[in-house]
Amino acid sequence: MKSPLFRLGVLSLALATTASLSACLSSETGGGGDGEGDPITIGISLPLTGDFSEPGKGVQRGYEAWAEWTNENGGLLGRDVELKILDDQSNADRVASDYERLINQDQVDLVFGPFSTRLVVPAAQVAQDYGFLFVEPAGAAPEVFDQGFDNLFYAAPAVADDHYDHLADYIEKMPAAQRPKTAAVAVMDDPFAMGTAYGLKARLEEMGVKILVDEVYPPNTTDFSGIAAKIADSGADIMVGGTQYQDAVNMILALQQLNYQPKMAAFSTAPTNPEFPQAIGSKTEGILSPTGYTPEADHETNAEFVDFYTEYAGTPPGEDEANAWTTGQVVAAAVEAVGCADPEPECQGELIDWLHENEVQTVVGPLTWDEAGRPESAHMIQQYVDGKIRIVLPEELAEAEIIPVKPAW
Amino acid sequence: MSLLVQSLILGILLGGLYALLAAGLTLYFGVMRVVMIAHSAFLILAAYLAWAFTRATGLDPLLSLVGTVPLFFLTGVLMQRLLISRLRPATLTMMSVLLTFAIALVIEGMLGFVWTGTQRRIQLPYGGANLEFAGVNIAVVKLIAFGLAAVSLLALYLLLTRTKMGQALRATIQHPEAARLVGINTDRVAGYGFGLGLATAAIGGTALALDSTIYPSLHWHWIGPLMAIIVVGGLGSIPGAAMAAMVLGLGQALLQIPLGTTWAQTCFYLALFVTLMVRPQGFFGGRLAQRF
């Protein structure tokens, strides 16, 4: 006679076997990720800690907001999207192995790019090796596009060198007598910052403007009085700063302390930071800066993005969030047009080809790319007018009239 | 010509600030053979406290010194009594590097946790103000920082040479065992020495906050040059550190004109290498036993 206890044992064993068997079966169908109702997985590595953690988190917020919006609005090809985000600790070796892992081990369907030139290049190389489409939100420096990648697309209006194009055009159109004749250039030893300032410097040189100061400083510079002394001594008409943030603020204060009053002053990145007017105070008037994005811009889908993001995060989006969202929009446009989202080389190849041939409407404006993935638009130019940063160039997007001669700071 | 004079003035002002920032660092080493990696982290902490004080009250950041100087002195005494004094004398110098490195990381992490990594700057009504004479501009904030440095270094000097506690401290620096024999409580004196060092960090950090943008990891940019200054000046010698700070500050400002920023910064490390090769005990101090 068998005891009830023994029967219970057999029963539970049988149940357990069935359960594990069905688990195997379901994971088999789910693992490939190409079944109809399954989510589309998107692999991303971001610098969530380390040097780039601040902008890295901004990009993360943008990606997550985009995924949520997409899922609320019917998903991609009728499937939900699911993000898999790893932390590369701002480390270039780590970012490459992260993308290896995402593509090989996690078998994601698509990848989005990380933040900043230094991490984009190794990540794009991995994506290229596996034939993956690689759209990235933040790698604007020339070396990103000099590597011969054919799978890379930068999801922003312009590469670093072209950021000041509208300002250069404006200066070119000025009557010769009003045009600046001399310039001082100070740039951080950083591919992005150098790209922006040298783009404008090259255009100024073409116009016959004399470059009186051409200074490069390492990223860890904290004392700018020496550089400021050189610039003040030159008395240049236009000051061009290839800056990030703290360097621009410290340099501007050091220039004020030496009573240097240029007719025009342009700095990259820093002036668009909300912390900037808090640091400089009332002396921001007339300072120029290129920007790829503002929540006010009148581009198709932008208002919808700003409303959704503001409700999602509680604050309006910044440039990092917008570029991340743009990356999502670009990939989504290709996926919807081609009709596939899987890691197979044929599908990825079709996505890449489609983006090379088509224009995509995004929150930073309509985007097209050249064969190396350089976007072919230009950045807007913003200026502090009446204490607020406003778009002044190009004219068709301007919110305020440009101040041609900067008031004293 | 005016650029040269201007750079000369800027170099002197910069040198004064360097002297103040490095004074505490050389004191710790003099008193206790402690290499205090966290000194610059405390500078940034004081800068943040000054910034937070101004943001909360709208008052001048210099007034925050009333609170931060005693607070830092007390922190220094406690840190020495509770942490540093527990390290074994035989490995003190080595282990103090590890211990204070950890403290620096804790401070940096706490700053980021409390005030985020956003870069901050105190907005002063006189931030860009300057005095002009003979074609040279002198920034008011730099002058204030220089004044703070001069006053606190002088006060430190008088404290060490004219007071009983200063004599006890110097005795402890010169010969701890002999000091104990004549009845000096060297443990307590070492605590005060550490407290004094941190009190200079409170003043230095506030001076720094007047004219720079601060962020939690900024202290890593400072610790290297400050270490170079105290080695060139002779470890443990405050006048030596002040002299070295002035020479290196001037050197940096003047080399900037022909060489540019990148190479001007290397003058610190070049001076460090030369010192270690030619005169390892430092250029301005005597032998360690006779310091001060």
Image (tube, helix red, strand yellow):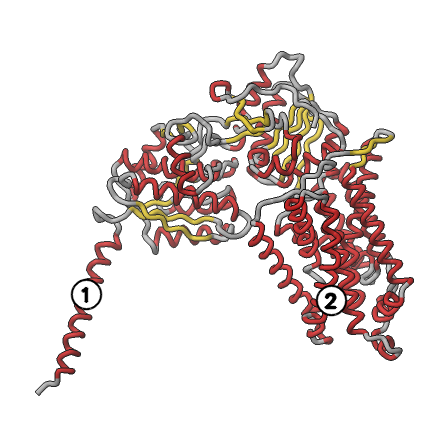
Q: Amino acid at mark 2?
A: Val
Q: Amino acid at mark 1?
A: Leu
For disc 1, the neighbor class at 10 Å (few under 14, some 14 to 19, many from 20) is: few
The C terminus of chain A sits in image quarter: top right
Left or right: where A69 falls relative to B147: left
Q: Secondary structure at mark 2?
A: helix
Q: Quadrant of residue A253?
A: top right
The percent coordinates of residue B216 (x first, y second) are: 61, 51
Please, is residue A53 above or below residue A193 in the view? Answer: below
Q: Quadrant of residue B60?
A: top right
Residue ID for mark 2: B77
Task: Say which residue appears at 40% left-offset and 40% top-offset.
Answer: A311
Left or right: where A57 falls relative to B91: left
Which of the two residues, B267 or B48, is positioned nearer the viewer here?
B48
Subunit that carries the residue with mark 1: A
Which of the two residues, A38 or A219, is positioned nearer the viewer here?
A38
The percent coordinates of residue B33 (x first, y second) are: 76, 68
Labels 1, 2: one chain? no
Left or right: where A320 falls relative to A338: right
Task: Say which residue appears at 58% left-offset and 20% top-offset.
Answer: A402
Can residue B279 be seen here? The reply is no
Q: Secondary structure at mark 1?
A: helix
Residue ID for mark 1: A21
Please, is residue A330 above or below residue A402 in the view? Answer: below
The percent coordinates of residue A70 (x first, y second) are: 32, 40
Subunit that carries the residue with mark 2: B
Q: CA distance from mark 1 to mark 2?
A: 66 Å
Left or right: where A191 falls relative to A236: left
Q: Residue furthest front?
A: B57
The percent coordinates of residue B132 (x first, y second) are: 83, 31
Which of the two residues, A121 or B251, is positioned nearer the viewer here?
B251
Counting labels gives 2
